[in-house]
Image (cartoon, rainbow, N blue to C red):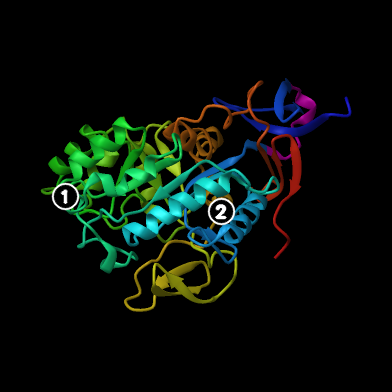
Amino acid sequence: MRVSEMIARGRLVLEDRVAPGRVVAEAGRIARVELDDAESSGPWIMPGFVDVHVHGWGGHDAMGPNGSLDGMARALLPRGVTSFVPTAVTAPIDTLLEFGDRVRRWIQVAPEDGSQPLGFNLEGPFISPQRVGAQNPAFVRAPADVPFREIEPLLATPNMFRLTTIAPETPGALDLIGALAERGTWTSLGHSVATADEAMAGYDAGARATTHLFNAMSGVHQHAPGLAAVALARDDVYTEVVFDGHHVDRLLWALILRAKPAARLVLVSDAISLAGTGDGRGTLGGLDVEVRGDECRLVSNGALAGSVIALDSAVRNLARFGAPLPRVSAAASANPLALLGVSDRGRIEAGLRADLVELDEGFEVRRVMQAGIWHEGPAPA
């Protein structure tokens, strides 16, 4: 082995199968993939996880200062998240502009020993006041009431403003969805009471994804299907799911896996800053929340308020549920990257970034390789 080489060995989760072998990395890239039956008893090796919808982790808030973003990136990496998109909650327009500018500047100096940021995501403010979920209703706006020039600064840097959640039935939504798509920012439909026709119109206008399926949206009804039904029925749209066992009942997991094409399912955490810190109280968008065990809820009404998992938990839950590992891996890596239009990572393939996750038999993260450098997994509980 050359001094500059790093090797991951075990059961490689490839695009179409699981095969024993080794991944050889050089200069931060995958140099070779060597299949070898001798590695059949080794750990699982997956591409690094990519979280496109995460509000915080480890006590660090995505909407906090640079130090908080540093802490969030460093807290996510041991969980196998090698790339992420810091996500804002619904807030005043000025606050969102400041958030976007802060992330834009921070990306230039983001820590090398943390998960790599790929831009930013805004979950609101153009959502339905009838489906705010854990968002602050005081900051919800209708697209028709906000001149495009007010949000245009968010688009100042290409490939930075990656995603935003919009309710397609709100006044001016379709025009905004189209205008953003023309400029390379994709809309995810969510926090919505859309009818099936309104949801279809949103996707046809340029929306590309769906925000945390089933949560804070019109659902599946035999006479009045809503956004969730359309998201499952349309094979061309990406669909986020929070596989924590609380956001979507496990009984529905099989339905989701059968309905969505393998290339369109996207695992997200929707994690908040309290994730990874144990039981306690905090705030989300100015609202009081409380963590008990493995879930977080609004103090005011008990509604779910994001999650307290990272993507390693979602991967573990879905793998233990019995989903094929190539499909689990794609939902955690290749698919979110395809949604963003990022093609230099997310698969075990020569020439791509050497972002890998080593997991034990029970799918617990042992080590994480980012750009060819190994990092330890989470400390034992």
In the rendered structure, find residue 320 and report the number of the disc placed on it. none
- The residue located at (24%, 35%) in the rendering is 178
Identify the residue shown where x is 75% and y is 47%: 375
* Rendered position, 379 above or below 372: below
Q: Circle 1 is placed at which residue position?
A: 144
Residue 355: give x, y in percent of width and height: 65, 36
Looking at the picture, how far across and down is residue 367, in whole percent?
A: 73, 46
Q: Secondary structure at mark 2?
A: helix
- The answer to whether residue 256 of the structure is visible from this angle is yes
Residue at the disc numbered 2: 313
Q: Dot 2, how many residues are within 10 Å of its Cα: few (below 14), some (14-19), or many (20+)?
A: some
Q: Position of residue 84 (x, y in %)?
A: 53, 45
Q: Quadrant of the C terminus?
A: bottom right
| Residue 207 seen by the camera | no
The part of the image, by quadrant, that contains residue 303 is bottom left
Q: CA distance from mark 1 to mark 2?
A: 39 Å
Q: Residue at x 76, y 34 (%)?
A: 8
- Against 233, residue 221 (above or below) is below
Say which of 106 and 114 sits in front.
106
**x%, y% of residue 295?**
47, 67
- Please give the range of residues in magenta: 35-44
Q: Residue at x 31, y 53 (%)?
A: 214
Looking at the image, how many numbered discs can be counted on the residues?
A: 2
